[in-house]
Amino acid sequence: MSGIYIHIPFCKQACHYCDFHFSTSMKKKEDMVQALAKEIQLRKEELENEVVETIYFGGGTPSILQIADLSFLIDEVYKHYNVVHNPEITLEANPDDLTTNLSFRGTRNLLEAYRMIGINRLSIGIQSFFEEDLKLMNRAHNASEALECLQVAIQYFDNITADLIYGIPGLTHEKWLQNIQTLLDLGIPHISSYALTVEPKTALATLVKNGKIPTPDDGIAHEQFLMLVDLLEKNGFVHYELSNFGKEGYFSKNNSAYWLGKKYIGIGPSAHSYDGTNRSWNVANNSLYMKAIAENTVPKEVETLSTTDRYNEYVMTGLRTIWGVSLERIENEFGSIYLDYLLQNASTHLQEEKLELVNNILKTTRKGKFFCDGIASDLFFINLD
């Protein structure tokens, strides 16, 4: 099984914390849709022996596109790839797009129209239900739209995930619990949650540097992460990946494929792909991307992964998930030298109870989850081959 990710590189405005590739100019939107469709066709041979299980519209803000654009791109995938019956088709959406465009052609609801063209999963960027948080992050929606879009969405979609951000300056523990509880009260079956991080070259980095916004407090973020884990697990969610929580049957098939090392292709500027041996990424420039596609060339760079690269990636992704790192796979796929190195460097974390070894699977404990990226870096093998 494999997946197709389609990057829609447009947003109404720039969130202060975002370092993804996008443009706030919509002048070339229709040209971009045609270019995306052409790349879908150009790359069909890469998955000719695979069955496509997931189609994921990410961004940027995919909900900016018209129904006809989304339907056209989905049809192009079906036209050129072997798609499984009833694939998971996810649309990332902003609350303001869902609330301001609820009526579609007068009588049909926009959300119903999404469903009719095959979209069966919504990923909604809520981030917070409090106005002051949304303004600090420069989100395009307001607090009432955050709530309203979910109240409407649950009438049309069963499979919904919502994003929340913790560690926001000024976000008290009480407000954080209210954000989580609001999603629980609505019956949202999947929640993705991330700490607010200050990425280089973002507006947030400039605001923090100039003292306009306080530096996010790592200690508070850690406390809010633990509160999140506790409350969601008590309500029947499985913490199946560091930032992702789902009820049984609602794990993201698209994202799980990434973590489990399955093949996927990324369509659009800045999109990444993986074929089991190589990673590649398209140019992060809309004009250069469209020019190359018009010349029947995919503007991408390719990196062939070494044994060490593949080991490091498996350790990193494995420790983030409930599936952990299989010692048997490490030995069989990478060799005993990697296994010995892994166990040696894991020993301190095992003693500190940040890692545990159960049935030959190395996993992060509840205590270690928040620190799993740092733990993984301690286990990385450098310059072995």
Image (cartoon, rainbow, N blue to C red):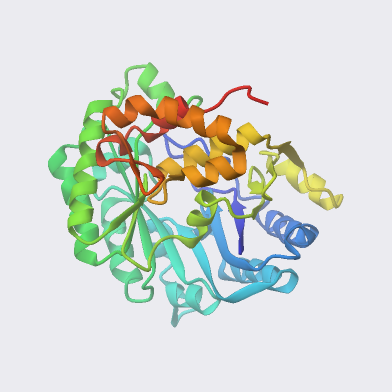
Quarter placement of the N terminus: bottom right
Q: Residue at x 43, y 39 (%)?
A: 15
Q: Looking at the picture, how far across and down is residue 165, in whole percent?
A: 32, 43
Q: Looking at the picture, how far across and down is residue 154, in whole percent?
A: 32, 71
Q: Residue at x 65, y 35 (%)?
A: 307
From this viewpoint, which residue is outermost toward the front? 336
Left/right placement of residue 367 relative to residue 92 reads left
Observer-nearest residue: 109 or 54? 54
Q: Residue at x 30, y 35 (%)?
A: 368
From this viewpoint, which residue is outermost toward the right? 295
In the picture shown, does residue 220 fall above or below 155? above
Q: Quadrant of residue 365?
A: top left
Note whether residue 77 is visible.
yes
Q: Looking at the picture, how far across and down is residue 350, in whole percent?
A: 32, 31
Observer-nearest residue: 297 or 257? 257
Note whether residue 65 is visible.
no
From this viewpoint, which residue is outermost toward the bottom? 107
Left/right placement of residue 117 relative to residue 132 reads right
Quarter placement of the C terminus: top right
From this viewpoint, which residue is outermost toward the top? 210
Labels in figure, total: 0
In the picture shown, does residue 367 fall above or below 72? above
In the picture shown, does residue 43 fall above or below 111? above
Left/right placement of residue 9 relative to residue 288 reads left
Q: Looking at the picture, how far across and down is residue 128, in whole percent?
A: 28, 47
Observer-nearest residue: 288 or 47? 47
